Image (cartoon, grey):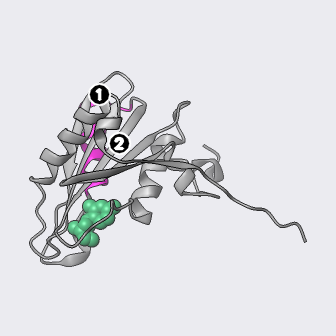
């Protein structure tokens, strides 16, 4: 038997004011994006702002549907918008903000969004940072790289990419 252990380190900042100005404004963009969510079924509004390595900011928000499974998470809405408008440039930081009165701590991306974010991460040389917080403020969880949230990930390398 050969047991392996997986550890990762992340940071909790007390408030977004502890962050660099560019990160604070990225969070502000994500807060504004959360107001463009269409979430009449869950009332769980998510806003995402992506900053590319060349400092473009692209946003997205979750879009639900009466046919529940076809709704789309904010992360993927923002990612698709980014690919479409900015091209496949490296992603530097992704701010993810939740606006929901019952949610007291930041939420981290769902499994499908981790997989999707990691797809683009696997094609860039640099980490893809995440900043997770609430629209109402409070703590910011900083994750150094999306790949930290997806150990033993399946990616294109299994398909010879
Ligand atoms: N949601 C996101 O937009 N991102 C996530 O990472 C988790 C969940 C959305 C999907 C749905 O519209 C609502 O939040 C409740 O699950």
Q: Is mark 2 within 8 Å of ligand 1?
A: no
Q: Which residue is mark 1?
A: 22
- Say if 21 sits above or below 96 in the image: above
Q: Which residues are magenta?
A: 74-88
Q: Give the residue drawn at x 52%, y 33%.
A: 124
Q: Is residue 24 left or right of residue 146?
A: left
Q: Give the residue drawn at x 9%, y 53%.
A: 35
**Helix, strand or loop status at disc 1:** helix
Q: Residue 99's image quarter?
A: bottom left
- Say if 107 sits above or below 52 in the image: below
Number of on-image labels: 2
- Say if 159 sits above or below 73 in the image: above
Give ligand 1's quarter of the image.
bottom left
Say whether disc 2 or disc 1 marks the residue closer to the N-terminus: 1
Q: Residue 64's image quarter?
A: bottom left
Q: Which of pointers 2 and 1 indicates the residue nearer the eye?
A: 1
Q: Is residue 16 left or right of residue 119?
A: left
Q: Which mark is residue 113?
A: none
> Residue 26's x, y, as percent?
26, 36
Q: Which mark is residue 94?
A: 2
Q: Is residue 122 left or right of residue 6?
A: left
Indicate the quadrant containing the N terminus: top left, top right, bottom left or bottom right: bottom right
Q: Is residue 78 magenta?
A: yes
Q: Residue 68's image quarter?
A: bottom left
Question: How packed is label 1: few (under 14 Cα within 10 Å), some, or many (20 or more)?
Answer: few
> Residue 115's x, y, as percent?
47, 57
| Nearer to us in this view, 38 or 158 | 38
Which residue occupies the extreme right position in the image?
A: 1
Q: Give the residue drawn at x 12%, y 77%.
A: 66
């Amino acid at each position: 038997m050969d047991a392996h252990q997986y550890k990762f380190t992340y940071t909790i900042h007390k408030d977004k004011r502890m962050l660099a100005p560019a990160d604070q404004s990225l969070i502000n963009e994500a807060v504004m994006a959360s107001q463009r969510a269409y979430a009449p079924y869950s009332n769980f509004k998510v806003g995402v702002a992506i900053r590319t390595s060349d400092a473009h900011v692209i946003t997205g928000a979750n879009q639900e549907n009466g046919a529940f499974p076809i709704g789309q998470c904010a992360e993927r809405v923002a990612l698709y918008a980014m690919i479409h408008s900015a091209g496949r440039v490296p992603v530097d930081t992704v701010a993810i903000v939740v606006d929901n009165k019952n949610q007291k701590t930041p939420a981290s991306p769902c499994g499908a969004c981790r997989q999707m974010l990691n797809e683009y991460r696997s094609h860039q040389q640099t980490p893809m940072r995440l900043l997770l917080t609430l629209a109402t403020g409070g703590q910011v969880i900083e994750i150094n790289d999306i790949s930290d949230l997806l150990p033993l990930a399946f990616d294109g390398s299994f398909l010879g990419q």
